[in-house]
């Protein structure tokens, strides 16, 4: 069983799509799956130079990312199954076309790019690609679509497609040093970690913080991440205008520093208007940090498993929820943190998710029993 996954960009600064793809394939290699990844070389390429990462010389042209090197690789190398990550790029379409030409099965993981809110951005370009760029055919003829949550599957079905859908969450590689992290929660901190972009709704989190006024004078808001320069500058200007001394812009964080900062938070806030899965949610839970996430994310489990809050992302609701979290005892925060750790271990650990993907591949290639997470 020789598998090729593909992705247009695989840079560390590309966001969650690159991270979860790397984490999944790393775990799949650990459990003995022969999976390669084709992508384009970049200065911030994910990984540690693993041989299975086929990073081709970057000849991509146009925003569509047309690449002769990718075309050549796909033509010259044969795999039993093709699996592309993302939408709208030449890499994705070329992978699907290659699989059909070679009469091999293929999977598409949209990574949230078919949500209504995502389709609304640059809608005219996406309509052209759907109707005239072959994307509609790629989706319709795919042997399976991989969604990371049932909400994403619902949005896909609402577009009228009938092919099988596998609901497999993103994997969480729990670092070996997690138990060594020091939870310095004597300073109460609310954090945000992610790309600074309007759809992440960071301004509502900031406005909620401002509205709390003196109630958070002894606490800190830590905003971690980089993004659109204008949006980031707008956030910083709002902090300056209000003379806030308890808001920190920490910039891009990764590796151990990321987990250390997550472990130092009283709670992480994910106020996004919509989020396909939200890797940062499981990463925070894995280090015992409760999470406040908006109803635009698929994280009702925060409420049902008592490891956080699944709430509206308007300013009053966020402010009230933050106030509630900051009023909790250290013991209660620790209890919620342990609940989050148990949830991650039971459902989202990387090797467990890798086994699900292996099971999907075996069903498609070897006629094994259909997994219960596949919906037809």
Image (cartoon, helix red, strand yellow):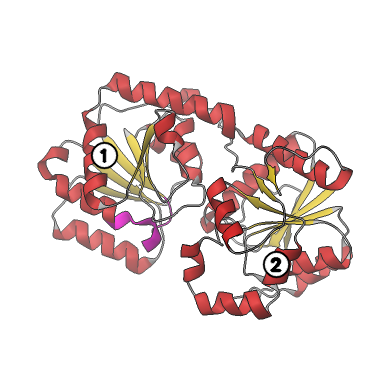
- In what quadrant of the picture does the N terminus appear? top right
Q: What stretch is highlighted in magenta?
A: 194-203
Report the residue at 51% width, 24% height from top.
342
Cα distance in 3D space between marks 1 and 2? 42 Å
Of the image marks 1 and 2, the number of the one nearer the N terminus: 2
Report the residue at 62% width, 60% height from top.
86
Disc 2 target residue = 91
Q: Give the answer, above or below, for where 126 lies relative to 336.
A: below
Disc 1 target residue = 321
334 in the magenta segment: no
Camera-side residue: 147 or 97?
147
* Left or right: residue 55 compared with residue 305: right
Instruction: State the image coordinates of residue 127 (x, y, percent, origin top left).
Output: 58, 77
Q: Nearer the viewer, mark 1 or mark 2?
A: 1
Q: Give the answer, above or below, for where 99 lies relative to 357.
A: below
Q: In which quarter of the image is residue 311?
A: top left
Instruction: State the image coordinates of residue 96 (x, y, percent, origin top left).
Output: 76, 65
Q: Within 10 Å of the Cα at label 1, are there few (<14), some (14-19), or many (20+) other Cα atoms?
A: many
195 in the magenta segment: yes
Camera-side residue: 220 or 126?
126
Q: Residue furthest left?
A: 214
């Amino acid at each position: 069983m020789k598998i090729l996954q593909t992705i247009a960009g695989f840079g560390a600064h590309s966001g969650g799509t690159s991270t979860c793809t790397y984490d999944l394939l790393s775990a799949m290699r650990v459990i003995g799956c022969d999976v390669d990844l084709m992508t384009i070389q970049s200065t911030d390429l994910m990984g540690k130079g693993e041989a299975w990462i086929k990073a081709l010389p970057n000849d991509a042209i146009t925003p569509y990312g047309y690449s002769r090197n990718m075309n050549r690789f796909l033509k010259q190398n044969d795999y039993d199954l093709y699996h592309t990550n993302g939408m709208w790029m030449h890499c994705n379409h070329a992978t699907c076309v290659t699989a059909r030409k070679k009469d091999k099965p293929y999977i598409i993981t949209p990574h949230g790019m078919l949500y209504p809110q995502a389709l609304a951005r640059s809608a005219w370009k996406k309509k052209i690609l759907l109707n005239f760029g072959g994307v509609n055919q790629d989706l319709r003829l795919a042997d399976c679509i991989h969604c990371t949550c049932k909400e994403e599957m619902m949005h896909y079905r609402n577009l009228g497609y009938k092919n099988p859908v596998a609901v497999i969450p993103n994997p969480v590689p729990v670092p070996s040093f997690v138990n060594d992290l020091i939870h310095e929660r004597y300073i109460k901190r609310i954090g945000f970690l992610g790309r600074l972009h309007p759809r992440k709704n960071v301004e509502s989190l900031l406005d909620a913080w401002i509205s709390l006024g003196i109630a958070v004078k002894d606490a800190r808001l830590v905003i971690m991440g980089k993004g659109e320069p204008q949006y980031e500058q707008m956030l910083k200007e709002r902090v300056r205008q209000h003379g806030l001394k308890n808001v920190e812009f920490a910039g891009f964080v990764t590796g151990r520093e990321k987990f250390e900062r997550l472990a130092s938070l009283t709670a992480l806030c994910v106020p996004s208007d919509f989020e396909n899965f939200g890797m940062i949610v499981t990463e925070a839970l894995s280090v015992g940090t409760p999470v406040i996430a908006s109803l635009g994310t698929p994280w009702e489990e925060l409420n049902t498993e008592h490891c956080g809050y699944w709430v509206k992302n308007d300013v009053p609701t966020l402010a009230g929820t933050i106030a509630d979290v900051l009023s909790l005892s250290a013991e209660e925060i620790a209890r919620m943190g342990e609940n989050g750790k148990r949830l991650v271990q039971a459902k989202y650990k990387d090797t467990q998710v890798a086994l699900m993907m292996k099971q999907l591949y075996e069903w498609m290639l070897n006629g094994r029993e259909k997994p219960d997470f596949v919906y037809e």
